[in-house]
Image (cartoon, grey):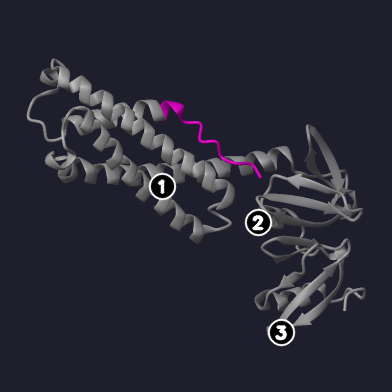
Amino acid sequence: MVYVRYNDLWFRIIVPVLVAHFIVMYGEEISLFEAVLTQIYYVAMTGSILIAFLLISFVRWVYLKLDRKFDWRAKPLERAALQVLLGWVAPGLLAFLLAYVYFAIRGLRILKTYYLRFDYPIILVLLLLLNLYYLAYYFFAQMKIAERAVANTPVVTTESDDLPQQSFMVNQGVKSIPVPIVDIAYFFREGDYNFLRTFSGDDYTVIQPLDELEQLFPEKDFFRANRQMLVSRKACKHFENLPYNKLELVTEPKYKIPIVISQKKSRSFREWIDGNNSVK
């Protein structure tokens, strides 16, 4: 899987300056020209810029970590809950602690200032907007990654559109390898990565998500058994009935855990596989 890197260093440099100036000048009755002539303006700006940069960097770090374990598309509910907790609540507490240290260095008690009344609510709103920025960045970057994946690793055909003459490009180290579609047993997801397994048992990593692969391959030849598996018709050895109208699919080559087809998908699977005498 290709992860978003959030290459926005200039954003993390420029935005803290703008936010710091806004926070420092918010509620002040003097003009900008008067403020820049005072020493306290630069002291406040320095502290505010540092705090803003640390908070933005922290939220970015949270996104990088959560993307690897709780991808938005794979685990949306868990990700949303963790994002609120780690991407908004935690930075909110961190902002208060950093401000506490800043005021303590200046010999002030934060509870005796107007920070909690005026500045802190604004900071919480800005942290929320920061999370929305990285959320938009994530989906935009994923869209670009998908576009490049389709352009760089397409399903290519030779002179005919028949399935036996098609290949799918996979990566192995620095090499790109064409795998004939007739050799593909199934695609599966394991941890944070997607793999292709051939009938000979060879595994290759693929960068496309299973949803995209499902759209890429002919519906008559590949079936989305569940969230972790896209299986070729030829790989289906047999299936067994489970309680609650579920099915357990057995493939060749075998998969290490049972392939369970849900009640919702069992009927469509039976219709899809109907007519294949090797599967009962």
Classify 10 Å Cα crowding around label 2: few (below 14), some (14-19), many (20 and above).
few
The stretch in magenta equals 1-11
What's the residue type where badge 1 is placed? Gly
Q: Is residue 65 above or below residue 256?
A: above
* Residue assigned mark 3: 243
The structure residue drawn at horizontal position 23% and vertical position 43%, both measured from the top left corner, is: 120
Residue pictured at 52% horizontal, 48% vertical? 66
Prevailing secondary structure class for the magenta stretch in the rendered image = loop
Q: Quadrant of the N terminus?
A: top right
- Above-or-below relation of 30 to 197: above
Q: Secondary structure at mark 2?
A: helix
Q: Residue type at mark 3? A: Pro
Quarter of the image holding residue 184?
bottom right
Q: Is residue 86 left or right of residue 93?
A: right
Q: CA distance from mark 3 to mark 2?
A: 27 Å
At 58% across and 57% down in the image, what residue appears? 74
Left-right relation of 257 to 139: right
Q: Which residue is mark 1?
A: 87
> Going from the N terminus, do you reach mark 1 or mark 2 first?
1
Rendering coords of residue 26 (x, y %): 16, 34
Residues tagged 1 and 3 counted as in contact (Cβ below 8 A): no
Q: Nearer the viewer, residue 177 or 250?
A: 250
- Measured in 3D between alpha carbons, the distance from the residue under mark 1 to the one under mark 3, in whole angstroms, is 41 Å
Mark 2 or mark 3, which is nearer the start of the sequence? 2
How packed is label 3: few (under 14 Cα within 10 Å), some, or many (20 or more)? few
From the top left corner, tell me how far across and down residue 151 is, in percent.
69, 39
* Position of residue 3 measured from the top left corner of the image (x, y, whole percent): 60, 41
The circle on residue 211 is 2
